[in-house]
Each structure stands twice: as structure tokens, then as C-alpha cells.
Amino acid sequence: MAQLDRLIERLQAGQEVTLESGKPPAIKTAAGSSPVAAQELSRQQVVSLVLETASGPGKEDVSAGQSATFEYQLGGKRFTVEFSASEGKASARVFPAQPPAPAAAPAAAKGPEPEINAMLRAMFALGASDLHLTSAHKPMIRLHGDMKELPDAQVVWQDKMAPLISAIMPPHNAAEFEEKRDTDFAYEIGGLARFRVNVFMDRYGMGAVFRQIPIEIVTAEKLKLSKEILDLCFLSKGLVLVTGPTGSGKSTTLCALVDYINRNRRAHIVTIEDPIEFIHNKKNCLINQREVHSHTRSFSAALRAALREDPDIVLVGEMRDLETISIAIETAETGHLVFGTLHTTTAASTVDRIIDQFPADRQAQIRTMLATSLKGVISQTLCKKTGGGRVAAMETLFVNSAISNLIREGKIYQIPSIIQTGKKQGMVALNDALLKLVVEKAVDPAEAYIKAVDKQGFAALLKSKGIELSLTALDE
């Protein structure tokens, strides 16, 4: 019998047992937290208590000191166990698991499962990130960064594509597709994953791309985000940008940061997304997730409304136009922490992109506002891992007084040199991030070279470390 059993067997909905090193075990309810013992727990005691309830992959993660979420059954009751650990500390929450939604009745009412689900399940089973459908072609998947045909799949002809996609397309998106010939929405297969969907027209006819969004949130600990990046989550105000090309993992990084805030602060978070990707449940924060077109007219309209919704943190899924960027900077200046994304490849180009969005007569004012409000930029790119999978190389910029002055004076070209000299503050240049992955043998030198923006400088770094670069491996 696990030692936790006597603490959790009488838990009701809305109650939980909390374990934290340096504190006694406690039962938490809506009215507050009450210790159930006088003795403070050590890190090892927390780990031992959780290990008694864990099995399979969950047990492996806990033993390795990694964050884990799993279910534990006691008699006829199911409990959710959430464990997290860092150097010298460990904590866990145990609470009654939500009963599974009654799936039988809705399935009977809605008829058979949509045909597209079979392809999505096959894609998921293979570990692919994307499913690509093009009329008159076989379905293709992106697996570890490479495009491959979906095994055993047949050609999807033009007359079959429309009913295949229309069966899952919300009415608003169907109307938008008729008008604009492309549209975005989210689709979920319960218990499997959510998918971000783009439907488009090309010379072959109708097509679609499904990007997998895992139901399980990837934590900051699993992404191995640095302490300096995580410190951005505790700012009271300012603008933090996560940038990179399409498919570089920006959404995953932002999701990990929001989840970290959810676990470590008591705040109100408003997210504005198109579409909603990762689902965040309440932990220590209240989170309102709004979807453009479904819950609000546009990013800019939702961002204006957010100022009247008493937020501490606002996440803007895409800062895609002048109005949204302008309001985001103003929101960051007026006492809110704003997270946003841009499709830029380096920290310096991010600052340039923002300023260039504005008319010439406003750029001096925006430089001044940005010098005050911008707190950090994380520019990332995904690289193929040696042996399969992908890993992000992150260039990180933290705005200090030197960088603030450069932004104000319009000397953006000097920012890369400040990143090089700011290593003690946690700043990392993209070339250094790529080199670290190569040295750790996580990424092949040729792959890192392809992803480098300053290829000449990266080649010189490899040479200084005595690492051979085989140019014949490059697809130039």
C-alpha cells in the first residue's frame, strides 16, 4: 500500500494533496491549504512518495528527476499525479482525475468517424509532425524534418478531397474558404491530439496541411529552457518575443512558458490565438484562451479588449500587422507582460522588423518605446537530431542598458556583438547555440551549417574546435 493512499483516498473534486520539498505535506481546497503532518519533506522523500504511485514511462521520468504527469488508481477511484523537479527541489500534486467524457452517445448521434481521422491516426503512430494532402497525389508526412509518403495510402483525387476536408471544417471556415480560397482552424481527435489545419487551393485543386499539436504540454523542464529564459516569466511588465521561421517550434516554446507561469505564479493570463493550439487547464493561474474568428474578430480587437479584462499576462499568437504590434507595445508599456511571435530568424532582425512596420515619421517614437518595453527575444530554428527527432537551437537576447541604447539610437547592427559579450547574462548567439548541439553530438555539423545564418562565421567556429565539415553532405 502506497503511503499516499491514506491521504488521497477521501479526496473530493476540487481538493488535492500537495508535496513540496522544504514543506510538510498538505491538503489544498478552495478555502486554503492545511498541513497534514509537522515534518517537512526532503526532495528524496517527495520523489519516493511519488514513485510508489508511478509505473511505466511516468516512473522512468520521476526516477530521472524529470517532470511527469500520470494517472494512479486506488480502489475504484482514479487520481492524476503531476510531478516536477529541479536541482535540489521536487514537488507534486495529486487530485481526483476528471471522469472521461461519455463518448458513446455523441458518436452514435454524429455517425461514423470522419474519414480523415484514419490518416491522422497513422501519421500520429509514425511520430510525424505534419500531414500534407494535395489533390491527385498520395498523402505525405513530415517525419523528423523530411517529407515522405504516408505508407499504404492511396492517391486522393480532386473529387474526393472536398468531402474529405469539408466533413471536419467549421461553418465559418467553409465560408472563409469560399471567399479567400484558404483558411485556418483547429481539429481534435479526442484522446489522441489536436491539429492546426490550413486548407488551400493550388493548381491541382483543394489541399490541406495538418500540424500535430500534442495534447500533453511539453514543459519548460523537458525543453531544457535556461534559467535566464524562465526568469522572463516573472516580469511584471514588458514585451517578450519568440521568433523563427514557420515550423520552428515557436508555439511549443510559448506553450512551455505559459505552463511554467501557470505552475509558478498566481496571475490572470489571456491568450489570443488563431487557432487555439495547446489547451491550458487552471493550475495556479486563471487562463482565458480566445480564438480569432470564433471568440473575437481579430488579434488587434482582442488585444484592445484584453486591457479591460484585468490581465497580468497577455499572449498574442501572431503579431502580423501594424495595429497588433502597436497595441502590443503599448500594452507592455502600461504594466502588462506580453508574449508574442514574429517570423524572423535572428534577434537583431526581429527589432528591425518591428521598427520597419511603422511609417518613417513614427519610427523614432517606436524605437524609444521598444527600448523601454522589449525585455527579451528568443529566436529559434529546428534542427534534425542525430538518430532521429528534432531539437531547437535558440538565440537569446536579453535587453540590458547597452541594447536599450542601441535600439533607441537605431544602431541595430551592433546588437550581435552585444550578444557575444553578454554571455554572462545568459545571452546566446545562434552560431554558439548550433555549435553546442554539434559538440554534444545532438546535431550533425552539416545540418547545423545549413541552419546557420552566418555560415562563414559558423564554419570558422567548427574549424576552431577541430570539427570537420563535409560540404558534400549539404544540399546547396
Image (tube, grey):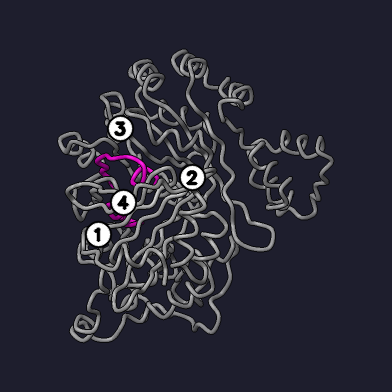
Give the residue number, with chain letter if any, for mark 1: 176
Sequence-wise first label, 3 or 1: 1
Residue displayed at 45% across by 60% down: 49
Which mark is first along the chain, 4 or 3? 4
* Place of residue 114 in the rendered image (x, y in percent of width and height, measured from the top left): 32, 80
The boundaries of the magenta stretch are: 260-283
Mark 2 or 1 closer to N-term? 2
Taking the view exactly as shown, the residue that stands out farthest to the front is: 38
Could you say whether the residue bearing mark 3 is in a helix, strand or loop?
Answer: helix
Q: Of 430 and 269, which appears nearest the observer?
A: 269
Asked if 159 appears above or below 354 in the picture, the reply is: below
Q: Mark 2 or mark 4, which is nearer the start of the sequence?
A: 4
Q: Name the residue under label 2.
A: 89
| Above or below, comparing residue 40 to residue 209 in the picture | above
Answer whether residue 213 is visible to the viewer in this image.
no
Relative image position of residue 178 (x, y in whole percent)? 25, 63
Calculate the distance from the C-alpha at mark 2 to the C-alpha at mark 1: 50 Å
In front of the other: 236 or 376 = 236
Read off the residue under disc 4: 26
Instruction: Look at the numbered discs 4 and 2 and tell me whether their residues touch, using CB distance below 8 Å.
Output: no
Dots 2, 1 in contact, CB < 8 A: no
Percent of width and height locating residue 291: 25, 52
For the point 32% across and 42% down, the residue is: 316
- Name the disc covering residue 328, or none: 3
Q: How far apart are marks 4 and 2 (CA)?
A: 17 Å
